[in-house]
Image (cartoon, helix red, strand yellow):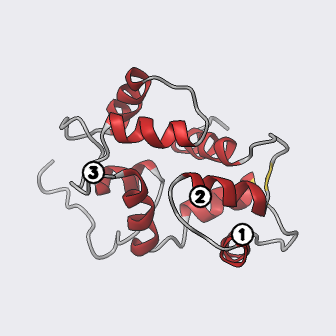
Amino acid sequence: MEKTKSMEEVEEVFKRFDADADGKITPAELGKVVRALGSEVSEREVEVMIEEMDSNRDGVVDLQEFSEFHRGGRGEEELKDAFDMYDADRNGLISAGELHTVMHRLGDTCTVEDCETMIGSVDSDGDGGVNMDEFNKMMGGRAGADAAAPTDAAA
């Protein structure tokens, strides 16, 4: 079965969380990423996050569990919180500079130009940034899809 772009994006995000590349996200790895993104979380809060994704209850999150979490059940509030971690100036758009800052906090050595390319790959309206709708699509989510589904009338 051919991988879709969405599946590849989920795998890429998973790899960023899985620091030791053992195929599992541990509470320590998740905590490190969340803290690098600027959120002050307790060990218990990290454990709760793991529990939300850990369907087989082995204490870690594998790629399948991460993918299932990505595809389903993510509420609008959680998605907005994730978006806000990137949108530092709170203008409703994630810019290449904002993405670059977060990527560097996570230890990535990408350039601003790399971030511009990443932004361009999901910037469907061509405004140079990623808005909430584009972020939702990029994350493979369906948050609020029933309430705010786009119509095909304009197509």
Residue 18 percent location from the top left of the image: 74, 46
Mark 2 or 3: the one toward you: 2
Amino acid under label 2? Arg
The answer to whether mark 2 and mark 3 are in CB contact below 8 A is: no
Tell me how far mark 2 sits from mark 3, CA to CA.
Answer: 23 Å
The residue at the far right in this view is: 58
Disc nearer the start of the sequence (3/1): 1
Is 110 located above or below residue 88 in the figure? Answer: above
User: Could you tell me if residue 5 is visible in this image?
Assistant: no
Is 43 located above or below residue 118 in the figure? Answer: below
The residue at the far left in this view is: 154
Tell me how far mark 1 sits from mark 2, CA to CA.
Answer: 15 Å
- Few, some or many residues within 10 Å of mark 1 (<14, 14–19, 20+): many
**Which residue lies under the disc numbered 1?**
50
**Residue drawn 61% across and 36% down?**
107
**Which residue lies under the disc numbered 2?**
35
**Which residue lies under the disc numbered 3?**
131
Disc nearer the start of the sequence (1/2): 2
Q: Relative to the observer, which residue lies in front, 132 or 150?
A: 132
